[in-house]
Image (cartoon, helix red, strand yellow):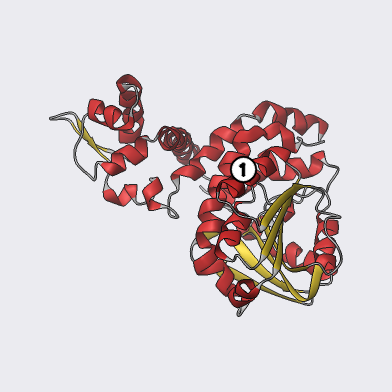
Amino acid sequence: MCMQHAGANPTLSTDEFGARFLGWLNGGAIMLMISVGHRTGLLDAMGRLGGKPATSADIAFEAGLSERYVREWLGAMVTGGVVLHKREDGTYVLPAEHAALLTRASSPNNLAGTAQWLSVLGSVEDLVVEAFRHGKGISYEAYGERFHDVMAEESNQTTIGGLDEHILPLVPGLVERLEHGARVVDVGCGKGLAMVHLAARFPRSEFQGVDLSRVAIEAGMREASSRGLGNVRLVTGDVTSFGQSGEFDLVTAFDAIHDQSRPAEVLANIRRILRPGGLFLMQDIRARSAVADNMDLPLGPFTYTISCMHCMSVSLAGGGPGLGAAWGKELALSMLADAAFREVSVHELPHDIINLYYVCAG
């Protein structure tokens, strides 16, 4: 008999739980192989074949890879239901319906890049296990350049891919302000690709980005330089004290506030550096503040996992509160009010199932 506590998921029988466990195990394995397929270009190569049946040798040739590795990878993709296989002639097909979510050509709808998080976060598992004992968290630097690469790729999908069509239109008149000339800063900017994108679109405006990671900032400046953009500047700095009072018309923070070691001070500083009539646009994880309210969250397990393996931990490492990725809308609104933002509206956008968008008037 299954038992259920109020506000909890039901208890499964041993057999039911065993079946679910097998599903998790196979799902995790498929995610690792999708990550490999994304990084090696195998999924893109199969997408380019346009649904034409191909042997493992054909696919390996198209991707420029070893046939033996490709054949074993295809075994995982076939048994996982990602790729179709025909026994009679030994051919494989990536259906167009699957390619629409798994190839770079399908961006910003490409989900394959998200699969990379399992291996990226798994690389610090030993450090996380130690942190469970000492409770001090893991430093930002421990995650290495690979973390920033995957974060930038994710940002390209959810942030940069949605800026023009979905995010900027949240604020009436914002596009016009940027076209005429405004000062903008992105706090916790990572590689600063959002500011680089906006700098290219709005040459009359000035854009800055600030982040603790020197490696990420240097990569972003190389990108800006390669595109010949003189109206964007990325710097390494502390976002709790960056900027002059009343310096900026718009401040953005894309999935950055909950990671901070001093999030309340960061929000207060953002309020300080806004000009009168300025706006703070905050993208952060779509969640409620109580775990019992997140039972139907589509990416609930993923949200808490990435938080445990990174978001919460890097905040704790800096002596912070460790808000975690699922700090939630209720706490976010409370902290924004404490930072003296007068009006806050919260939005869900159709292109992004993982984030909420807060528009905050200074």
Binning the other alpha carbons within 10 Å of mark 1 as few (below 14), some (14 to 19) or many (20 upward) gives few
> In which quadrant is the C terminus drawn?
bottom right
Query: Which residue is pictured at 80% across the width and 53% down the height?
Result: 239
Q: Position of residue 231 (x, y in %)?
A: 66, 59
Tell me: residue 247, above or below residue 230: below
Q: Position of residue 111 (x, y in %)?
A: 45, 48
Q: Position of residue 272 (x, y in %)?
A: 85, 66
Taking the image as shown, residue 171 lies to the left or right of residue 313, namely left
The amino acid type of the residue labelled 1 equals: Arg
Q: Say how many tags the image has.
A: 1
Secondary structure of residue under mark 1: helix
Viewer-closest of 193 and 134 = 193
Q: Is residue 10 visible?
A: no
Q: Position of residue 283 (x, y in %)?
A: 64, 61
Taking the image as shown, residue 352 lies to the left or right of residue 143, namely left
Q: What residue is pinned by disc 1? A: 222
Residue 117's quadrant in the figure? top right
Tell me: residue 14, above or below residue 345: above
Residue 245's quadrant in the figure? bottom right
